[in-house]
Amino acid sequence: MNKSEEIKFTHRSDKDKKQLITRLKRIEGQVRGIQNMIEDDRYCVDILTQISAINAAMNNVGLNLLEKHARHCVSDAIQDGNGDEAIEELMDVFKRFSKS
Amino acid sequence: MNKSEEIKFTHRSDKDKKQLITRLKRIEGQVRGIQNMIEDDRYCVDILTQISAINAAMNNVGLNLLEKHARHCVSDAIQDGNGDEAIEELMDVFKRFSKS
Amino acid sequence: MNKSEEIKFTHRSDKDKKQLITRLKRIEGQVRGIQNMIEDDRYCVDILTQISAINAAMNNVGLNLLEKHARHCVSDAIQDGNGDEAIEELMDVFKRFSKS
Amino acid sequence: MNKSEEIKFTHRSDKDKKQLITRLKRIEGQVRGIQNMIEDDRYCVDILTQISAINAAMNNVGLNLLEKHARHCVSDAIQDGNGDEAIEELMDVFKRFSKS
């Protein structure tokens, strides 16, 4: 059932998980809120303002994960002598992230 | 119940509404998917890849709304002689959107 | 000498031109400044800070042109009944701009 | 004359310097090209297309520097036990860069 060869894992503290999930639940609610705004024929610009707010919130979650990734996964890889691959991956993530 | 002085409206066709809401429901599901990935201690980079996908999907919804806004609301305002205000608002949305 | 079929024009006031060119000359100087920083082996992060400043300045020039374009070219096109094409072009510019 | 306490340095190979400076000279030429386009009343959209090209080229220079920074400066700092500060600085650059 578990393809552990393909799926990689990162340990996170309960506190970190809780914080991230709280933020994501709020974003989920904001996405539902936009569905209601569309149902209710709300003004485009007000919906676009909400979309910008969701993007900003999502980017904050992303930057939070990226920082922890750099601070833990990449640091560990560098100290284990596998820094090159880890940094290449980090740069790929960053490129994708800064364009999205 | 309705503060029509404050809340502005834009008429949308049933087809447009359906399409937008379908896309937003998919995004909502993706946001829930990320919560599961965090619960399951999934690898940061895989989560960040999902976040980039959500941002891209959200931006597509935004660009779709923005295009319809320009094509209808702004066009109408220009033809009614209220173009200046409409274009100022459009530029504000652009700026907010291109930074988020 | 002039391929007027291919090259399109937009009239700008002398004041607008002067203002834009002053800003672009400053950006040109900043780009030269970065070359010197690289020659002088200056610290990456300080160079990256300068690059962010140039991007921000360049985006301001772009937004200024985009606003004037919307306010004049697009408005005129809409009033002349050619709004669809003008707005399609505006959205293309915006998409390219928000990704670059 | 030299405030070496304040100015930080990064060693770069002659090949790297040459490559970066060649790219920056090309960008400098593109910025001058835009000044000419403005002088010549060229169409806004064509100028905006050039600005997008400059932004993309500038971002490439930035990503190139960022990658080398991560691969050398940050890696060295982590191996020397100063990783925390280096990663905080890297994240700051990321944030500034992804917003500009």
Image (spheres, coloured by chain):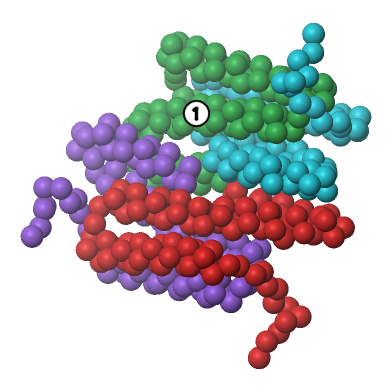
Chain colours: A purple, B red, C cyan, D green
Q: Position of residue D97 (x, y in %)?
A: 53, 41
At label 1, the amino acid type is Asn
What residue lies at 83% left-to-right and 22% top-to-bottom? Answer: D39
Residue C66 is drawn in which quadrant?
top right
Badge 1 element: helix
What residue lies at 60% left-to-right and 67% top-to-bottom? Answer: B12
Quadrant into which the N terminus of chain A falls: bottom left
Residue C12 is drawn in which quadrant?
top right
Q: Where is residue D90 in the image (x, y as percent from the top left)?
A: 44, 41
Q: Which residue lies furthest to the top in this view?
A: C1
* Near-viewer residue (C91 or A30): C91
* Near-viewer residue (C28 or D17): C28
The local crowd at label 1, few if under 14, some if 14 to 19, many if 20 or more residues have their Cα within 10 Å, is: some
Q: Which residue lies furthest to the bottom in this view?
A: B1
Residue at mark 1: chain: D
Judge left or right: residue C67 versus residue B33.
right
What residue does disc 1 label?
D60
Q: Where is residue D68 in the image (x, y as percent from the top left)?
A: 40, 28
Judge left or right: residue B10 versus residue A33.
right
Q: Which residue lies furthest to the left in this view?
A: A1
* C23 relative to A37, above or below: above
Judge left or right: residue B35 versus residue C63.
left
Residue A91 is drawn in which quadrant?
top left
* A15 relative to B77, above or below: below
